[in-house]
Image (tube, helix red, strand yellow):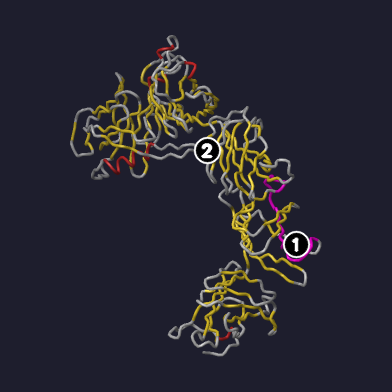
Amino acid sequence: MMMMNETAATLNSSSKINILQEINSLPMVDNETHVFNDLCDEQLSFTRNDSQPIWCLFNGTGNDLIVDYLGGFEEFDGNISSTSINIKHNEFIQLLVKYQLSAKIGDVVKTINLNRSCKRVYDLSPSTNQNRPIQMLCDVQIRNDRRHVIFRSLVKIYNNTTVPLSVISVDLVATEQNHKIATIEDNDQYFVPTDLLYTYSSSQIYIAAHGDENNIETNNCCSIDWENKPTMERTLKLKDGTEVHLTIITELNAAYMENTDQLDHTCFNIYIHPTFCLINLLPIDIKYLFDIDKEIDLKSNQSCSMISANRNSTLTFIIPSYDNARWISDAIDLKLERTNDHYEYLVLFHYATSPNLEKTLRMILRVDTIHKSHRLSLYSPFWIFNYIDLKLELQIENNRTFIDVAQTPVLVCPERFESETNRKGQLRLYGIDQGDTTTDWSKKFSLDVIRSIGVVSCEVPNDRKYMICMDVATGPSSLVKIIEFSPLLVIINKSIIAIEIVEAVSDKEQNQWISVNPEQTIPFWPRNMKDGVMRVRYTFNHVTSSPFTMTPTYRTLLRMDYEEHPALCVEVTTNGQGRITVIFEDYEVDDTPLVNCEKTNSSSL
């Protein structure tokens, strides 16, 4: 059995190897070869010989397995042996062999062909069901220059839940004789022993919630029909009385009949999932609860298995802190009867302390259904970041959202929340001495893009324009768009002296002088980017520099007429995406800067 936490896997040299492997909580992949690779890399040293292939054999049948090769084996430690090797259950060995060997399980001997990487089913003996002989699967894999042979039964179980499960041997007559065969840890896999598959006349495997006791009552178990039912729903009960609701999916994989080319046999992978899984795709932490159960925390971009949820449950979300308030959603009925692979619900949140207030918050709950197992994703389609010093208003499909000056995102969900193409947005400034009737909206810009960077022009009275950089990008999920608004022009003062700046057009100052302290960064909103120039002065003496343009890209010196700091270095750059940065730095007498006097009318130094 392959165990998730530390488990001892026995080598034929009687040494012990500890294996620690991580498996994602989402549907698992066939990963036993990765265990073998780690095992061989760390524990089994050998000298590579391409003329004698190296094979790593694993016995997962539940019985002892004897392998034999008449030409003799060369083991990984270099010892030569002409006798058969007995591989215990759950044991790895490494051998140098040709492409054929014999395997004996019980009294049955089978010749195993290793010349192809594939799955082959070998009949061992009749069973109580004449239509299902006892069979063994040989899975030959070649990955990362390693050759693996896995002997096991036809059935492998993946436990994709968050609770350990026990595999039970059930006595259908004397129920007190039921006992635990093995434990499958959460997010682990298990090779069902060959004998257990043929204990009953029907294709049944029994599982239960894991407990310390070995004898388990039949009414605490559930059965899995691994051969006839591709999808099943089962319920188990934990010690504390909590019910665990499971969706069980059987995946069929084709296999060859023994050493032939007839691809007419089948092996089975059984995936055990919780009926519901929840993913928080919001940039904030949330809580959720079922019916009147306790609140459960779920951090941003985190998923969880909702093992206690069933189709008769109601789901409620709580946002502990957003926009200086606590929010609670309307209850959501989990009777998901639609047949679509995915669909979306609008989730309305209200103030938790004042639910009668009209202000609401909209989110979307997306449901993806795979074989009656449901993945729920709570998200907001637009995250808005306002990195400027002005309040904004965003309009998407006639839905308006106020965006305050803050470093935290504003979550926006239009009333028409269905995923559509060609959604457009418009922007305007908010609260700059203008009424709603006189404020102009910007031109529409597209939001359904993978990535878009541009400049939005917002006009206000007196022919004033504010140029705002806009960056639209896909978020951590393809369902989310992140929209960032930032100033077109940024001033950075790297000087040790406080400075003041102003825009000038035709030698006429356009605004009041703006102070910029050392190491401070501020946005700057010029009235005329094309024809305007800037001037700078030290705060303490008000001696003004010559004008210089705001058009990138260049670097120059400005005479400041101050003995201790006679010049100020200015560099105008762009990030290639529209944003302009003006950087002021001190000039020392011994510095030798690159001076471009063509950009300015100042005297050369």
Q: Give, as a three-letter code, the residue at label 2.
A: Cys
**Quarter of the image with the N terminus in it:** top left
Closest to the observer: 555 or 122?
555
Q: Is residue 204 above or below residue 588?
A: above
Q: Residue furthest top?
A: 173
Instruction: Please tell me which residue is depicted at 61% across the width and 28% down the height of the picture.
Output: 311
Image mark for residue 304: 2
Q: Secondary structure at mark 2?
A: strand
* Start-end of magenta stretch: 414-436
Residue 66 magenta:
no
Q: Is residue 477 above or below residue 454?
A: above
Relative side of 231 to 189, left or right: right
Residue 159 in percent (x, y) is at 46, 31
Residues at marks 2 and 1 touching, judged by CB atoms closer than 8 Å: no
Image mark for residue 441: 1
Residue 429 magenta:
yes
Image mark for residue 382: none
Closest to the observer: 94 or 291?
291
Q: CA distance from mark 2 to mark 1?
A: 42 Å
Q: Give, as a three-letter code, the residue at label 1.
A: Trp
- Closer to the chain start, of discs 2 and 1, is 2
Residue 45 in percent (x, y) is at 24, 43
